[in-house]
Amino acid sequence: MKLTLYLLFGSAFILVGIFALYVLFYPQLVAGPIERPGNLLPQFRARHEFDYLRVRDGLLRMAWGLVKKMVIADRVAVIVDQVYDAPTAYSGLPLVLATILFAVQIYCDFSGYSDIALGAASVMGFRLMENFRQPYFATSVADFWRRWHISLSSWFRDYLYIPLGGSRVGAPRRTFNLAVVFVLSGLWHGASWTFVIWGGLNGVFQVVSIATRGARERLAARIGPPAGICVLRSVLTFHLILVTWVFFRAASVSDATSILLRVAGSLPVLPGLLQTRLTSGEAIVALALNALLRGVEIVDERRSMWDRLAARPLSLRWAVYYGLLGGLVVLGVWNLQQFVYMQF
């Protein structure tokens, strides 16, 4: 009898311990990726042996995440904060530039955190789901949300959109379902009208995209080659997402509205250039780093850059390793800027 009780209590203690590990797994505890029990719980029960390649890849992933955060996101944040803290003092190009750089900032900040989380988990022998997949290459708003914060998007899909009926219902109900999902996703980020409008705009873009899909496909078949149409769709999608980011970043709805009206009502001119730090070394470095990131992601879209690097000679691999560390030390902003998603 005592042996049976000991076994029962021991089994319960192990189960509670494994569940506690799942709840408190620190690499992704604060900002994701949002892991499902079905992925992590079996990994806690498995035995993990030291694997040099896994540890190496994890450390590289962490270094790349730190570069995204400290070298790119925190650097462009200087310009974004300067403009968005006083949006009425700027017009035209300064506001456009700040909005584009905020898109870069929030992506590098959040995907950088996810890279660090995935890398840290890999070093310890755990596999987390990918949370970003080159979202600014998306060819539609729906495609963007299949690439951006994938763990959260899939969570809303599985636990809200599908239970509401998903796309198996008629057009009016599907529109309602999308509206509910995106408005609630806005509220998930904060109890503010700016976040509600941000989520609502994404929902509106999704509904319009679905309603016009047939007409757009017929037009695309007539006017150009598939590659050119794909680039055009990607550029258009990026600019639609930029409009939503204005509400996400602005301090209030009135500030966001003012920014959009000023952009629409004025042309970029040289005085606008001078009002920003576009002519300073800080902005030039930020834009150059953004261009470098885009180039890396173009390469990474077809095949992982880490897989490509692993096939290169040892001397080249170590040159890249030292380059990452050197860039982090020399170009990193070392003032301990909080991750953007820590505030949600």
Image (cartoon, helix red, strand yellow):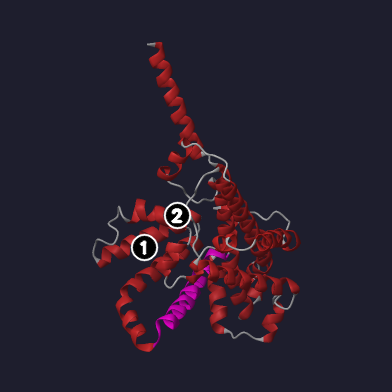
- Tell me the kind of residue under disc 1: Ala
Q: Mark 1 sits on what residue?
A: 179
Q: Is residue 229 visible?
A: yes
The 10 Å Cα crowd at callout 2, few under 14, some 14 to 19, many 20 or more, is some
Residue 317, picture quadrant: bottom right
Estimate the x, y position of residue 223 in percent, counting from the top left. 38, 88
Residues at badges 2 and 1 in contact (C-beta under 8 Å)? no
Quote the CA–CA distance across marks 2 and 1: 16 Å
Q: Residue furthest front?
A: 313
Q: If the image is split into quadrants, where does the N terminus sit? A: top left
Q: In what element is the residue under mark 1?
A: helix
The residue segment tinted magenta is 224-250
Residue 235 falls inside the magenta stretch: yes
Estimate the x, y position of residue 285 in percent, counting from the top left. 70, 71
Total numbered badges shown on the rendered structure: 2
**Residue drawn at (49%, 31%) of the image:** 17
Estimate the x, y position of residue 74 in percent, counting from the top left. 67, 62
What's the magenta bit mostly, secondary-structure-wise? Answer: helix
**Residue drawn at (40%, 67%) of the image:** 142
- Tell me the kind of residue under disc 2: Leu
The 10 Å Cα crowd at callout 1, few under 14, some 14 to 19, many 20 or more, is many
Residue 69, picture quadrant: bottom right
Give whichever of 255, 215 is nearer the camera.
215
**Residue drawn at (49%, 56%) of the image:** 131
Q: Mark 2 sits on what residue?
A: 152
